[in-house]
Image (tube, rainbow, N blue to C red):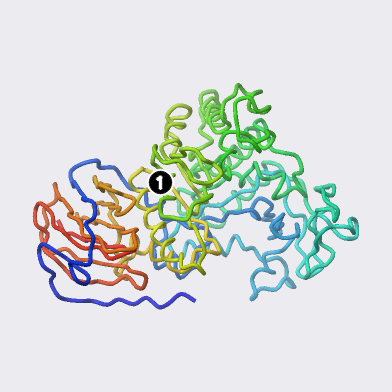
Amino acid sequence: MRRAWTLFVIPAVLAAVVVVSGPAFAASPGPTLSVDGGADHHPISPYIYGMNFASAGLAKQLDLPVDRWGGNSTDTYNWKIGSSNTGNDYYFENIPDCFDAPTYTCDDGPKYGYRAFVQKDRSAGAATLMTVPMMGWVAKDGKPNHPFTCGFPRSVFPNQSSFDPYDTNCGNGRQAGGGLVPSNPARDGVQIGPSFDGDWVAKLKSLYGSAATGGVRFYELGNEPALWNSTHRDMHPGPETYDELWQKSRDYGAAVKAADPTAKVLGFSEWGWPNYFCSAADDTSDGCSPDDADRKQHGGAPIVEWFLRKMRDYQQAHGKRLLDYLDLHYYAQGGNTTDVTRSLWDPTYTDPSWIGEKIRLIPRMKQWVAQDYPGTRLSLSEYNLSVGDLSAGDAKKNALIQADVLGIFAREGLDMATRWDMWNDGDLIDDAFRVYRNYNGSHGKFGNTWVRSVSGNQAKLAVYAARRSGDGTYTILVINKTSGDLQSPLNLSGISASGQAQIWRWTGGAINHVGNRSVPAGGFTATYPARSLTLYVIPD
């Protein structure tokens, strides 16, 4: 369980020149940090601080801006009966919403998890990002108890390599001697078309209003299509192609827009490299090139660019925009250091994983949009850059990584991001969000207008700065990613402090108010503890 929120206030006014934690001689020289309050201004989208399936308590504490209903099971979600299929994640079983919620029973009819989800978001003031199924099949039933309906039952295929120990009729779809058993979508699925999603959006609109009047604001078209023939091979055994992706995105997107023209639609939503460039019908075992079969049939264009061009051409032909956000999913694929965040932006950084290329993800996305469909916003509706293992003490490192990620999103101008929680995250991750959304326990926030902030060595000491439009306050976050204390000058320009700056600090426990300090016009030198977050809140 998450520890209680605790604040410790040290009222002392710190020295005007040097802030230290421990003896000054213990700190090593760090890189120079520079913040110019008058340069590089651009709005910071609040939607970059989103999550997937956030708890009600945390959502309220963070004033969570956006919460995503997504993931593999949502691709098979049958909103009419409140049931979904677990897919390859767990024996391809149809499970109703009431089975996942211990306080529910199915005896008096279906329970609708999506409604509880939206209501939770509404109570927290969060916008809902709802994934709508686009694969073409959803769960056909949702029995309240075992035995469940499943894609590969023992009664049909007795010689599978594994069965659910809690429901021994449901197998993993793999033959005991190797290979796959045949799929039949009708065993556990029912076929749907675009009207299924259109009717769901209409239902949501009737319950909560349109997107423009406080209802569900965002809709995502499917989930990771290039993995359908793996994650959901019981219902979609064939690989997704360029043409299938476009045709379904067009038709299901049009159904969403027809039901609620004020809603925003996210699309593509692919799992990662190399399926940003090739379809599932291409052989990507050796990478992806213009000569791969499906890609070659479509002029050799990377699938994401081809997709954007099709959306652009549709708008030009019909006068309607179907796609508001280009959406990707992105996970760290290798490495065990805080350098993993460089793959989001750094054109000189070669990813150390099997990818082995210069990813520069956000600039690459911006380039695609500028070339192929200007005006489209950018989203990462599933991402997680955690590395390592909690048992090896990596929880604190992952919190630093997350804080760095949010700063990069702000600096690079991403429009939306919803983090996916994983087993190796640990509860310290929440503090990375708190330092931006509730550093003082009273909903104090990082600024909403970016200002120029540069580190001489971001791999050691990162700096992110912004200004709050409401009160003109500047907020400057410094992240020490190293295992030792660093003493660095912070050069300031374009900032005139009207009073003393508050200093808030995280070193692995609560975010503490460690004091106040004067802010000389040209800046000051300070010591930043090992693996820490330090936030200056400077009144203007």
Quarter of the image where one finds residue 245: top right
Residue at numbered disc 1: 342
Kindly give the residue lying farthest to the top in the view shown.
299
What is the secondary structure assignment of the residue under circle 1? helix
- 271 shown above or below 446: above
Q: Would residue 6 be found to the left or right of residue 377 on screen?
A: left
- 106 shown above or below 342: below
Quarter of the image where one finds residue 482: bottom left
- Identify the residue at horizontal 54%, vertical 47% (top origin): 219
- Of residues 82 and 377, the one nearer the viewer is 377
Q: Position of residue 152 (x, y in %)?
A: 83, 55
- Identify the residue at horizontal 64%, vertical 31% (top origin): 242
- Of residues 285 and 106, the one nearer the viewer is 285
Q: Would residue 111 be found to the left or right of residue 514 on screen?
A: right
Q: Position of residue 419 (x, y in %)?
A: 48, 55
- 426 shown above or below 327: below
- Identify the residue at horizontal 31%, vertical 45% (top origin): 43
Amino acid under disc 1:
Arg
How many numbered discs, if any? 1
The quarter of the picture where the C terminus appears is bottom left
- Identify the residue at horizontal 57%, vertical 31% (top origin): 307
Crowding at mark 1 (Cα within 10 Å: few <14, some 14-19, many 20+): many
- Of residues 130 and 92, the one nearer the viewer is 92
Q: Position of residue 301 (x, y in %)?
A: 57, 26
Q: Position of residue 511 (x, y in %)?
A: 32, 70
